[in-house]
Amino acid sequence: MFLQMLSLIHKVASKNTLVFLEGETGTGKELVAHAIHQFSPRREKPFVTVDCSGLTETLIESELFGHEKGAFTGAQGKKIGLVEAARGGTLFLDEVGELPLSMQVKLLRLLETNIFRRVGGVDPIKADIRLISATHRNLRRMVEEGGF
């Protein structure tokens, strides 16, 4: 089983495709994501992990996409988001099933266009990331129930 997993990691790592990992908590999804990054052509660039379950709905957009000065109360200056921080490397969204529907739409737009805007910004920014996402939830069931 381990050798099969290692073979699959090597195969996936060489391609610049989206990767989705599903498994129970504690099964090593982040370890697999990191291994994919380490064996990929992006290995010299950042590997940025986002724990989607640990972010509040009000903060998640700013954390992922950053914000411009004055975008909201308390935005004292421009902030680079995690998508931008992962430029050239890998963005790992752990527990992606916890994202609110409003954020899922913005993430889908990023995946389709490779473009995003900081909160309060008007200028489009090109994203150069490989996205790996993971969850312990059954996303197929969540989609059927309208939760994802």
Image (cartoon, helix red, strand yellow):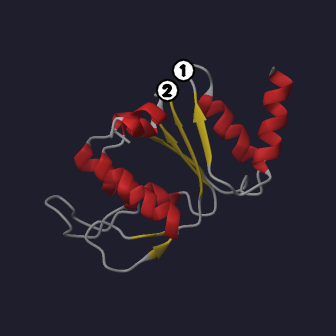
Quarter that holds the C terminus: top left
Residue 84 visible in rendering: no
Look at label 1 and name its amino acid.
Glu
In the picture as drawn, the residue positioned furthest to the left comes out as 73
Dot 1 falls on a residue whose secondary structure is loop
Q: Position of residue 14 (x, y in %)?
A: 80, 52
Q: Secondary structure at mark 2?
A: loop
Residue drawn at the location 47% of the way across and 29% of the way down: 138
Q: Quadrant of the N terminus?
A: top right
Give the distance between the C-alpha atoms of the residues marked 1 and 2, in whole angstroms: 5 Å
Q: Residue at x 42, y 37 (%)?
A: 97
State if disc 2 and disc 1 touch (CB < 8 Å). Answer: yes
User: To which residue does mark 1 refer?
Assistant: 24
List the residue tagged with mark 2.
136
Q: Position of residue 31 (x, y in %)?
A: 65, 31
Position of residue 102 relative to residue 118, above or below, is above
- Asked which quadrant contains residue 21, the reply is top right
Q: Is residue 104 left or right of residue 73?
A: right
Q: Quadrant of residue 69?
A: bottom left
Identified at 57% across, 63% down, the residue is: 87
Q: Position of residue 124 (x, y in %)?
A: 41, 77
- Circle 2 packing at 10 Å, graded few (<14), some (14-19), many (20+), is some
